[in-house]
Image (tube, helix red, strand yellow):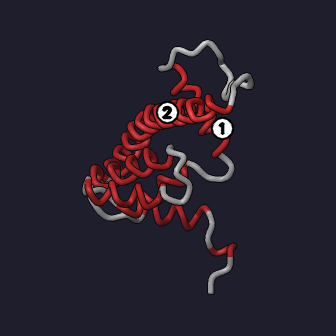
Amino acid sequence: MRSKRDIGLKKILSLFRHQNGSPLFNAKGLAIGVFSGCFPFFGFQTLMGIFFAKLARGNIVLAAIGTWISNPFTYIPLYYFNYKVGSIFFKTSSNKIIDKSFVIDDLWKQGRIFSLKLLLGSSCVGLLLALICGSVVFFIYKTKIKR
């Protein structure tokens, strides 16, 4: 049985470094994982990343690692930023997350708008981060092959 000290940053980087496959295969896997990790589907991000990596024929191990972009330390800042990005696409007079002057009938409407803003922002941020991380990983594995 392994202790918590055995699984550390060095092990994760070693797992990342020793992946087989083409640079495109590995980059697709990580990019899909990062994209999936930007969504607020707690507990399903890894499953979503693995599923889409299988569909796109990407590295499923790197897809699972990529979903770790959202973790207990980054949940609040990441999803707040995603919400703010999603809010750019909606014309609302208020910049608040939830308007305090609502009646019960408006609760469902505000919940729907909040969810739409968060999901739209998660899509935009996820796509941008996936492109950046995928490109970086592609060039890392490309230079690794040249050595």
Residue carrying label 1: 77
**Residue 121: where, in percent of width, then height?**
50, 31
In the picture as drawn, the residue positioned furthest to the right comes out as 100
Circle 2 — which element?
Answer: helix
Where is residue 20? Give x, y as percent. Answer: 32, 64
Locate the C terminus and report the quarter of the image it occupies.
Answer: bottom left
Residue shown at 41% from the left, 63% from the top: 61
Residue 62 x %, y %: 41, 58
**Quadrant (top left/top right/bottom left/bottom right) for the N terminus:** bottom right
- Residue at screen point 54% across, 46% down: 40
Callout in the foreground (1, 2) = 2
Q: Which residue type carries mark 2?
A: Leu
Instruction: Give the vertical position of 86 relative to 137 (above or below).
Output: above
Residue holding disc 2: 116
The amino acid on which the numbered mark 1 sits, given as a three-letter code, is Pro
**Distance from label 1 to label 2 (Cα)?**
18 Å
141 vs 53, nearest the viewer = 53
**Would you say 24 lies left or right of 61 here?**
left
Secondary structure of residue under mark 1: helix
